[in-house]
Amino acid sequence: MPSRVSFLTGRYPSALGITYMGVPVPPETATLPRMLKPYGYASANVGKLHFLPHANRDHRTIHPDYGFDVLEISDEPGCYEDAYRAWVRRVAPEHLDAISCGLPPMAEVWRRAMGIRSGADGVVHPQERFPKEPIPFRAPSHLTHTAFVAERTMDFIRSRSGGAVGGPGAPGAASAAGGSSSLQPWLCIAGFYSPHSPWIAPQEFLDLYDPNTFRLPDFPADVEARRAQAGSSDEELRAARHGYYAMVSEVDHHCGRILSLLEELGQAQDTVVVFTTDHGDWLGEHLRHGKGYPASDVVSRVPLLMRWPAGVRQPWRAVTELVEAVDVLPTLLECAAVPAPPDVQGRSLHRVLDERSAQISRSQARSSALTEHNGWKALRTERHRYVCDVRSGQIEEHLWNLEEDPGEYADVAGDAAYAEVLAEHRRLLVERVLTQEQPLPRVWAY
C-alpha cells in the first residue's frame, strides 16, 4: 500500500505519513492524474488501487476519486461487491458464484470467530491466504479479474480514440469511459491484482508449466534443516511457483492484448507504456511467502519496463542503475512536458535512460535505493543491503553482502571485517532521512 501511494505521488511513504498497511490515503492527496489534469489529460484507474483499507468497508459506497475521471475499483478478485463483480453480473451473471474464489484478508479468521462454516454462503473460499496448491479458476477464463482489468482498460482506450467501445461489458462502457475524444491526451492505469496469493489462475495457464522443471532456492544448511518443521517441502515450493508463474503468464497475455489494441488504433506511436509492480514474493525463500521485512531483493527488486514512442528513446536498453518507485511519476511528467511540483521527491529517469548515459557522471545516478516501513528502513546499494530496525525499542542493524550472498541469508553486521561498510551505510541512511524531510511551508520568520 505505501509503495502504491509513492508511485502516484512521487513522494516517500514517510513524507506522506503512510508507512504501513491500513492507512487511508487522504482524498485531497496530490496524485499523478491531478498533476496532469490542468494540462488537459483525462485519466482512469481500472482494478486495484489500494488507497483505502478494503477488508472493513462497503465496496458499494462512493470511493474518493483521487483525481481520476474514471475509477473502477476492485482491490481483491471476486470477494467484494465492487466493479469486478458488477461487470460479471452484467456480462455473465450465471458465473457470479464461480468467480468468488478470492479470499478477503482475515475472512477465515472472522468466520471461525463467528462460528460460520466456510462455504455457508454458497461460495467456497480457499482456507488459507497462501494455499499449498494452485487453484484453477472455476469460471470461463475470459471472466477472471485480470481479464476484467484488461477489458475495461481497452474500453477506456477505445473511448479516447473516438472509436466504438466494444468487448464484454460494452453496454455500460460509454458512460464509464467518461466521454470520447481522439484529441485529448489520457492516462490509464490497469491495476492487475495478479500475480498475488492465493494462486488462482485459469487451467490453460497452469497447463503451460511442469512444476517438476522449476529450479528451487539453494538454502544454506541451517535453513535446510528447518524446512521440514516450517512445512516447506519441495512439492510445496513447486506448487507456489506453479500458481505464481501461471498468473504471470495470464497477465502477460492480457498486456499483449492491450498493446495490440494500441497498434490497431494507431496510438502506439503516441503512447508511453510503463509496466511495474509494488512488490515481489518470497515464494518460499527464507521459508516465507508474501512480502515484507527486511525487503530483500526477492520482494523489493521488481520489474520496471518502459516502452517509448519511436524517436523518443532507443528501442531497447537495459538499465542497471538503482531507481525507486518515486522516480516513475517525475519521469512521466517530463514525458508530458508537465513541471513536477516542488514536493515531488523522485528523480526523472530520462537522463539515466538517455543513449548517452554511459557518459553521465556517477553523481546523477542513485547511490542507494530506500525502502521504508513503520519502525524500520532498508537501504540497498550496489553491493549491500542495510536495515535499521527500532520496532523492539532497541536499535537493530543488519547488513548483507549481495555479491557473495545474493539470497541474503548471512547477516554480516556483527562481523568486524564489515565495520567500515556498516558505518558507511549507517551514514547514508541518516543522510537520506535528514535530506528528505518535508516540513510544512514557513510563512514568517517567527
Image (spheres, grey):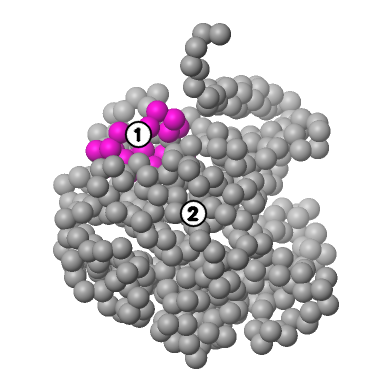
Q: Residue 262: percent from the left, percent from the top?
A: 23, 64
Determine whether the residue tagged by mark 2 lies in a helix, strand or loop. loop
Residue underneath mark 2: 64
Image quarter (top left, top right, bottom left or bottom right) of the C terminus: top right
Determine whether the residue tagged by mark 1 lies in a helix, strand or loop. loop
Identity of the residue drawn at 44% across and 87% down: 92
Residue underneath mark 1: 340
Does the stretch in magenta take in 340? Answer: yes
The answer to whether 81 is drawn above or below residue 372 in the figure is below
Q: Amino acid at mark 1?
A: Ala
Identity of the residue drawn at 31% across and 46% down: 37
Does the stretch in magenta take in 312? Answer: no
Q: Residue 363: percent from the left, percent from the top?
A: 40, 24
The residue sitting at the top extreme is: 445
Answer whether residue 279 is visible to the viewer in this image.
Answer: no
Q: Residues within 10 Å of mark 2 (few under 14, many from 20)?
A: some
